[in-house]
C-alpha cells in the first residue's frame, strides 16, 4: 500500500500485487461507465444503478424521457443522428452531460441498435471521461 507522501510502501503494509493493481484499474474503469437501454424512438427504457450513480437521477426522473435529457443542452438533431446507428456503424458522441444536481461532466456515448424482427431499441454505453 502506498503512503502517498514518498511514493513508497506505507510502514507495516505489503506492496500491492500486480493482480490487485489490475483489479483496481478494472473497477475504476467500470465506475466510469453506465449501460442502459433506449426504446425504439429514443426514450430511456432502463436505468440501472451505475447510470443513477453517474448521473444522479432516480429512475422515476428519467425513465421514458428522451436521451437528450442527459445532455447539458438539448440537442434533438444529435439524438436523431445517434438513433441512426447501425450494427456496422454504432452512433458515437462526445459532449457535456448534466447530472441531477446541475453539475456537468464530459461523456462519450456509444449507441448500438438491438434488433429482433424489428428494431427493439438501443443499448447506450455512457462513459464519464472528465
Image (cartoon, helix red, strand yellow):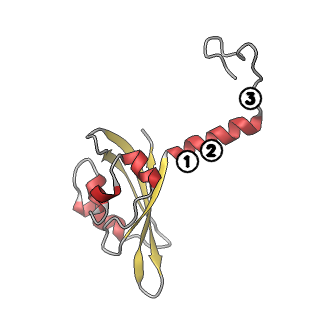
> Which disc, if any, is residue 30?
1
The residue that label 3 is drawn on is 16
Q: Position of residue 118 (x, y in %)?
A: 41, 85
Lower sequence index among marks 3 and 1: 3
Q: Nearer the viewer, residue 106 or 62?
A: 62
Residue at x 49% of width, y 73% of height: 87
Dot 3, crowdedness within 10 Å: few (<14), some or many (≥20)? few
Alpha-carbon span between mark 2 and mark 3: 15 Å
Residue at x 55% of width, y 47% of height: 30
Q: Nearer the viewer, residue 57 or 25?
A: 57
Q: Position of residue 113 (x, y in %)?
A: 44, 72
Q: Position of residue 55 (x, y in %)?
A: 36, 47
Quarter containing the C terminus:
top left
Residue at x 27% of width, y 63% of height: 66
Describe the element under mark 3 as helix, strand or loop.
loop
Q: Nearer the viewer, residue 10 or 108?
A: 10
Q: Furthest residue to the bottom?
A: 117
Describe the element under mark 1 as helix, strand or loop.
helix
Tally of numbered discs: 3
Lower sequence index among marks 2 and 3: 3
Does residue 100 lie above or below 69 as drawn?
above
Alpha-carbon span between mark 3 and mark 1: 20 Å
Dot 2, crowdedness within 10 Å: few (<14), some or many (≥20)? few
Does residue 92 lie above or below 73 as drawn?
below
Q: Position of residue 94 (x, y in %)?
A: 38, 50
The residue that label 2 is drawn on is 26
Describe the element under mark 2 as helix, strand or loop.
helix
Query: Tags 1 and 2 in contact by the CB under 8 Å rule?
Result: yes
Query: Tags 3 and 1 in contact by the CB under 8 Å rule?
Result: no
Alpha-carbon span between mark 1 and mark 2: 6 Å
Residue at x 76% of width, y 35% of height: 18
Amino acid at each position: 500500500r502506498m503512503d502517498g507522501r514518498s511514493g513508497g510502501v506505507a510502514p507495516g503494509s505489503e506492496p500491492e500485487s500486480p493482480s490487485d493493481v489490475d483489479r483496481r484499474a478494472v473497477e475504476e474503469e467500470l465506475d466510469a461507465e453506465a449501460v442502459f437501454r433506449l426504446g425504439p424512438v429514443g426514450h430511456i427504457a432502463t436505468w440501472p444503478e451505475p447510470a443513477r450513480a453517474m448521473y444522479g437521477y432516480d429512475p422515476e426522473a428519467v425513465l421514458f424521457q428522451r436521451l437528450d435529457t442527459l445532455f447539458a443542452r438539448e440537442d434533438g438533431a444529435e439524438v436523431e443522428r445517434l438513433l441512426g446507428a447501425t450494427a456496422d456503424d454504432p452512433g458515437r458522441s462526445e459532449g457535456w452531460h448534466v447530472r441531477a444536481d446541475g453539475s456537468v461532466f464530459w461523456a462519450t456515448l456509444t449507441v448500438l441498435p438491438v434488433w429482433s424482427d424489428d428494431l427493439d431499441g438501443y443499448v447506450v454505453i455512457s462513459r464519464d471521461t472528465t
